[in-house]
Image (tube, rainbow, N blue to C red):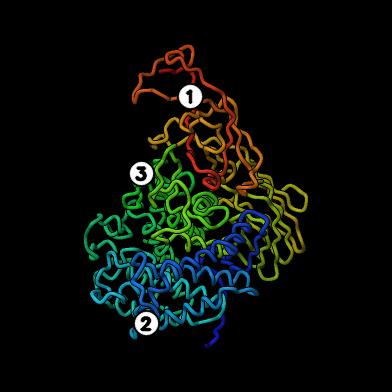
Amino acid sequence: MRMVRTHDVCAPATPSAVAAHDLTPLPVAAVELDPARELGAWQRVNRERTLPHVIARIESTGVLDNLRRLVGDSDAPFRGPLFADSDLHKTLEAIAWEAARVPGDQPWEDFARAAADLLARAQREDGYLDSHVQGDETREPWTDMRWGHELYVLGHLVQAAVARERATGRDDLMAVARRFADLAVAEFGPGSSRADGYCGHPEIETALVELFRHTGERSYLDTAAAMLDRRGSGAIGAGPFEPSYFQDHLPVREAPEATGHAVRQLYLAAGMADVAAETGDGGLAVALERLWGSAHGTKEYVTGGMGSRHRDESFGDPYELPPDRAYAETCAAIAAFQWDWRMLLATGDARHADAMERTLLNGIAAGVSTDGLRFFYSNPLQLRTGHDGTSEDSPSERLDWYGCACCPPNLARLVSSLGAYVATGTESRARLHLYAAGTVRLGATTLRVRTDYPWDGRVEIDVAGPLEELALRLPGWCEGPALEVDGAPADAAPGPDGYLRAALAPGDHRIVLTLPMPVDVLAPHPRVDAVRGTVALRRGPVVFCLEQPDLPAGVPLEDIRIDLSVPPRVGPGVRSLRAGATVLAEGVVRSSEGLPRATALRRSSRRGAASGMLPGRIALRAIPYARWANRAGGAMRVWIPVDEEGWTT
């Protein structure tokens, strides 16, 4: 096999043009996260537990057999969803980023080579490769652009191939991916007459742009742009969902809000951002700002979750954010993280890094258990006592796999590549976007970061090398930061982009950023009807929740009210949950046993007088939302009802 030169920047998304010099992406291996701290520990669990588990389930659930039967190596029937191939592709991408992150130890290289060989043998002579279509004599390629997912599968194959070649220099998977991509260009490129030349499930767009960046072949970028331009024509057909489910109701430049299937919308936005970055398309840039304001301003859960409807896994109306019916698919959170990364590179605005952090530490982290072996597909913000969690769409506990298993390998590939999102820059100018203990290498400059973030707001950075300026994100939740450079106070006022800047003379330096982390009591937006009269608890970027295992036996979570006359405070961490902090508060138990469905509220000088029930006091302990469902099962809630003085029934 021919060995090729690895890409200059071995990372998931490496735009050839970015907004500023200090937003140059870094290779995955440039950031070594401390395995004893939050993000590094997550990477360690991902490598030791999650990725091996995913590889084993890729085998046991038939994903590989689906391909083997095409070459006579298996007589098993097709198993899994029609896009099952993409689960293999995401797994191969995760393996590639692990090879980049830990280049001296590649335990899954034999698996990756065997998978690449199997894909090559299963590929048709013209480059087409989709086990679901090829294994069905009644189906023809490209005849179901609405539901077929063929271009979606190709997109994940391309991303895996780019990752593998960048990480290892091996072109075996790239040869397969380019043959399929070249076929797609011939079928759907700018010269194609196919009005339906776009996929019902966006993802191919961002993948083709990355393939252009990796190879320099302009036709990949042009094809991605052409697919965006066609969307909104309705050419891929109708039913059973409305065109907005597929983001096919309007041209992408005209869409007023984020709508439809959340994962589709967010992957589409990532592709739009990639095309805009490479072409300078101002119309796409304007549309992206509008979509971002809609998604993050009116349709995002406090945890960073996206998508409020189970029926079609979709965004709801503005402020339609029911906590107990939140779908908030793990893949949607990952897609939002990827979109925000591209928006950050394009604009340099810290609000996009804020969104990445919020989503990563809450909405994405909730998708996997602390042992790395169980997963949530949907991520509600409330689970009621007695919830029947037999459905995969809304289980009461994490499952070790799903019939539609898109989320576990998606988690594996993201966590393997986390280092690429921590910082950007060169050896003379750098920015830190996500605070995590570890080492960042930028050419001749090294940053050694010591912190227990997100459980503690003190971030110490030792700088060695010719760094002239270090920009540090001031999180949007933080007030009153302090900055020290070599022991002396420095200006802690952020620039218009939300970053503090420390100018550095030649030599080594020590920078200390202190971010105060009181417990914040959050009131919901008044238009979110489902959570009126409640509050959420947040400390730093971490959202907390109440969970049944922390309540006395026999006290249902639904009867708990928080007493805000006693300010919530920081509590000790829970080692078994890998949580560095909890939040302690005072609560009241107000029994609803036997009450009718509707009761009249009247003013009373003594609470509980009409019902004869006096409230009982209770100490409350809230744990990080991302850590719920790691102990005994039971109810959970993020939005906690407030105990109101002077009302009774």
Element at label 1? loop
Mark 2 neighbour class, 10 Å CA radius: few under 14, some 14 to 19, many 20 or more? few
Nearer-N-terminus badge (2/3): 2
Quadrant in which the C terminus appears: top left
- Is there CB contact under 8 Å for labels 2 and 1? no
The picture places residue 276, in percent across and down from the top left corner, at 41, 65
Q: Which residue is mark 3?
A: 318
Q: Which residue is mark 2?
A: 72
Determine whether 200 is above or below 120 in the image: above
The picture places residue 37, in percent across and down from the top left corner, at 66, 54
244 left or right of 342?
left
173 left or right of 184?
right
Task: Indicate which disc residue 369 carries.
Answer: none
Q: Nearer the viewer, mark 2 or mark 3?
A: 2
Nearer-N-terminus badge (2/1): 2
Mark 1 neighbour class, 10 Å CA radius: few under 14, some 14 to 19, many 20 or more? some
CA separation, marks 2 and 3? 51 Å
CA separation, marks 2 and 1? 65 Å
